[in-house]
Image: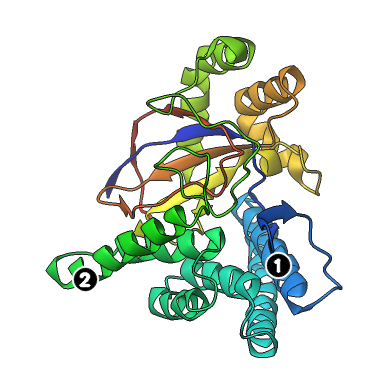
Amino acid sequence: AEQRLQPQVSATGMPSAPSRVTIAAGGTQQREHDSDADHLGVALDAEQAAKALESEAAGTTDSAAAAAAHARASEQRRAASAAYERASRLEPASAEVAYHHASYLRSFGDLLRARQMLSDAALVHAEEPAIASSLGYLLLSERGAAGAAARRHGLQVLTRAAESGAWRGGAPWQHPVEYLSAVPPPPAGGVRPRGAYECLLSPLEGAAADLAAEAAAALERFTVQTEGIARPQGGWRELDLFDVCGLRGGGGARSRAARLRATCAAVRAAVETYPYVQGALFSALAPGTDLSPHCGPTNGRMARDRPRSTEIDRDRP
């Protein structure tokens, strides 16, 4: 079957692995989690381990090794689900638990349960950015005439939170889960001048053709993007280049990177030039995929997307 996908490389200021959003009296802040501290920490660690194993399975040509990695990933997914359920039972009024558990449910397409969990949390934490952003945009994703009431409610959720000061000082269209008030809002139009980043952007743009070719060759290794905003589920896939290129460590990175030589060289050079780069991805949208209305996870991230199109002949799972 002919597939037209649109790979693009994103250099971002945020790691792709799950990290804990801690909800406290002044708003949300992001920090590393302690896996031994509570059930939520255990769930986040298990989810991160599952993603790493799924990436490992996608990156190997050894069918036995891939099957073993998939099996271990399934075990970690079961552990994550159980830990999220325990955390929700033990802390039913926790906005932090509700946010992370609902995000996990969305990653599997369980939108109804995620919506109910966030709606319950909003009864107590209506002005919390993580809850308001997640619920508001989830409601805005409802389709057709039947979803009109939900979309109106989503706008109301975001408007009330904004009027309460949840995103005070930010751009009027910024409603992130994690809001950093110290970050100045972007200029009108949302695009910052590129001058300060020329040394980072020009080499990546110069290598764009090689990156596009390697992305097309690696499409079968992409894994499903887990934000839960793509319809149909699985229509948005990605490849974590920090993982593949060994920039986060981990076994097998050398053999995986060998098939993405130009890409890994460009990403390593970008990190050496501009050490604030904390992540890079290849991302692909399958034909007919829609992305629901959404907002980035934080206003502390600046992304550079380089869209490319390719056409391949391949059966896709």
The picture quadrant where one finds residue 51 is bottom right
Residue underneath mark 2: 149
Q: Residue 209 carries which label?
A: none
Question: Circle 2: is it few (<14), some (14-19), or many (20+) Cα within 10 Å?
Answer: few
Residue found 43% across the figure and 36% down from its top: 7
x then y, percent, for residue 20: 70, 60
Callout 1 amino acid = Leu
Q: Is residue 301 above or below residue 62?
A: above
Q: Which of 59 and 47 is in front in this view?
A: 47
**Is there any visible trace of residue 41 in the rendered image?**
yes
- For the C terminus, the quadrant is bottom left
**Is there any visible trace of residue 317 in the rendered image?**
no
Tell me the element at label 1.
helix
Callout 2 amino acid = Ala
x then y, percent, for residue 256: 68, 41
Residue underneath mark 1: 44
Tell me the element at label 2.
helix
